[in-house]
Image (cartoon, rainbow, N blue to C red):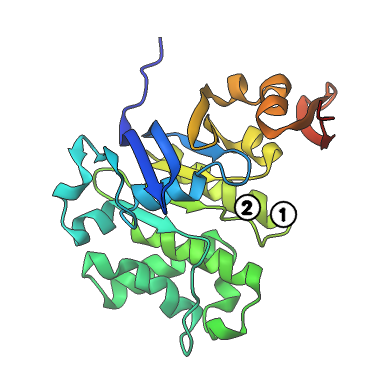
Amino acid sequence: MMKKSSPLLVAEGVSLTRDTRRILDNVSLDVRSGKLLAVIGPNGAGKSSLLSVICGLWKADTGRIMLDGRDIREYTSSERARRCAVMRQDNTRPTGMTVLEAVEIGRLAHGSGGDESSIVAREMLRRMDLEDLALRDCARLSGGEWQRVAFARTLAQVWKSEHGGVLLLDEPVSSLDPAHQHHLLGAAREFAREGHAVLVILHDLNLTAHYADEVVLLAGGRVRASGAAANIMRQELLSKVYGCRVVAVEDEARGTRALMRLPSLARR
């Protein structure tokens, strides 16, 4: 029997209230070494709020976040940054800075600077096919180009983390064309396979089914289902939670499966 990978990041019983509204209600999840965990759900499900709690931007009413078996609050900010990197939707691009310099920022928590930061940054640009943009001013990038650079910077932050790094990605492919969506998520999954862990918030059900090892399905601030992707990405369950018809289309010749969202279910 294959040994189950260990959790690098754990959220236990997280609840959150903002402006008298209950946004998260007793949410728990594990982000495991070697795995890519996708968090999905309708708009307003609490996905980005959960990420804000996990990365320490918001303080939960109840619950705790554990990083490698320790309460995340026990780590210094630099220790936490070396182990856990966040790519948020509102990544503000720097001005007057080249792409290479922007990616090098990801190494600040390591205190190395100089040649080591440049070497890691260039490797991240190579992985993301961004080498030709290394000297371009970030202000001149398209939205999709900047999203790929932001991912490269996030990856650089936890690159070769001694005890396993954690990537927290909030809708990292929202501005990308299909080819670059696959490229970025493929790079994230490859990072997980190297012994790290990835949590990614996604809207696209097909991308989720293709890249996620495990899935947490949120709705109304609660976990509606969690487990192996094959057990969660089912048309009956997704149709019920999303409030629209989700059908699976099989291509037996290619061994692929697509999920299609159809118009909303008639309300009675």
Name the element at disc 2: helix
Residue 118, x across and y down, in percent? 37, 74
* Numbered circle sitting on residue 183: 2
Label 2 Cα neighbours within 10 Å, binned few <14 / some 14-19 / many ≥20: some
**Quadrant containing the C terminus in the rendered view:** top right
Residue closest to the far top: 1
Seen at 73% across and 53% down, the residue is 178
Query: Where residue 26 sits in the image (x, y, percent)?
Result: 37, 31
Q: Is residue 74 above or below residue 148?
A: above
Q: Which mark is residue 6?
A: none
Position of 253 compared to 231: left or right?
right
Task: Give the residue displayed 66% in from the left and 22% down from the top.
Answer: 237
Residue lying farthest to the bottom in this orientation: 96
Picture quadrant of residue 209: top right
Tag 2–tag 1 contact (CB < 8 Å): yes
Where is the N terminus found, in terms of image quarters? top left
The foreground one among 263 and 20 is 20
Residue placed most toward the observer, 19 or 243: 19
User: Dot 1 corresponds to which residue?
Assistant: 179
Q: Is residue 115 above or below residue 152?
A: below
Assign a secondary structure to mark 1. helix
